[in-house]
Amino acid sequence: MFKALKQAKADGLVPRNVACLVKAPKGDTYSQPYPGQGALRGGQQSGDRLEAIYVVAIHCGLRQGELLGLKWEDVDLEAGKLSVRRSLSWVKKEPVFNQPKNGRGRSIRLTGAAVETLRRHKAAQNGERLRLGSLWGDNGLVFPGERGQPMRAWSLTGGSFKRLLKRAELPEETHFHDLRHTCATLLLLEGVHPKFVQELLGHTTISITLDTYSHVLPSMGDQTAVAMERALV
């Protein structure tokens, strides 16, 4: 819109670009309690078929669309890595695979727990495929619907995730996106450099990471003081 109005002004079609009068919104910060361990316990307790999606969301910080667009060809369990190459969205009731939000992919090192969970998940999915036979729509997705088809976002958030929140006794207002925030918050609290967190989450710039998680950084002030004292000894 801004560029369109800018061009219209240059062409003499409008007297001024009114978009210049609008103040850009401040970046969102995340200050809610993170539901990490509770979500993982909730998935494990019930043997949820989508337990692995919660593990990968928390351990790797992927967006919901990136998780639903993940394919087995993107996952190397032997090397312990996955590649984020696409994001799934729905347009007019049709699945559409687009580039990740930042316009480029990224490679992520998996934790040991994530690798083992994905191994179990793959074995269980192979069982589903054999059981359903020709009814299984093989799209190569890591987290498909119950018949292999691309999963709609509401099927996850309104179904499995809601049941998980109830089992884990987490607040109903908890969002799936909070699992991504859990990942970033835990890493920053463990002293991981924000640049590495930015790359893991796929933020376009480090300023987005710093603005979103600014509430975490002040609590790390003691670490900088201790580090300075050590450096000057």
Image: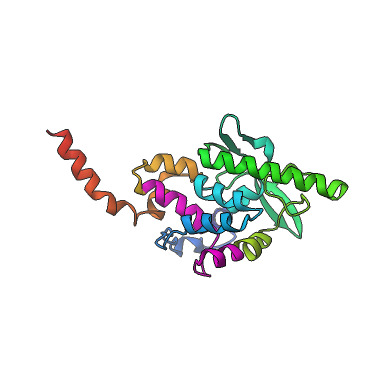
- Residue occupying image coordinates x 50% and y 46%: 59
Quarter of the image that includes the C terminus: top left
Quarter of the image that includes the N terminus: bottom right
Question: In the image as oriented, which residue stretches furthest toward the top?
Answer: 79
Question: In the image as oriented, which residue stretches furthest toward the bottom?
Answer: 172
Examine the structure image and report whether residue 8 is included in the region drawn in magenta. Answer: no
Nearer the observer, 144 or 211: 144
Residue 5 in the image: above or below residue 109: below
Q: Position of residue 141 (x, y in %)?
A: 71, 44
- Residue occupying image coordinates x 40% and y 50%: 186
Q: Is residue 23 visible?
A: yes
Q: Position of residue 110 (x, y in %)?
A: 53, 38
Q: Position of residue 61 (x, y in %)?
A: 51, 48
The quadrant holding residue 195 is: top left
The quadrant holding residue 146 is: bottom right
Residue 81 in the image: above or below residue 121: above
Report the number of numbered marks: 0
- Residue occupying image coordinates x 67% and y 50%: 88
Residue 187 in the image: above or below residue 173: above
User: Is 78 left, or right, of 91 in this rendering?
Assistant: left
Q: Is residue 104 visible?
A: no
Q: Of helix, strand and loop, which mostly describes the magenta segment?
A: helix
Nearer the observer, 149 or 126: 126
- Tell me where the magenta segment starts and ends, as one range: 162-188
Question: In the image as oriented, which residue stretches furthest toward the right?
Answer: 134
- Residue occupying image coordinates x 63% and y 39%: 119
Question: In the image as oriented, which residue stretches furthest toward the left?
Answer: 233
Nearer the observer, 32 or 211: 32
Examine the structure image and report whether residue 173 is included in the region drawn in magenta. Answer: yes
Q: Position of residue 34 (x, y in %)?
A: 44, 59
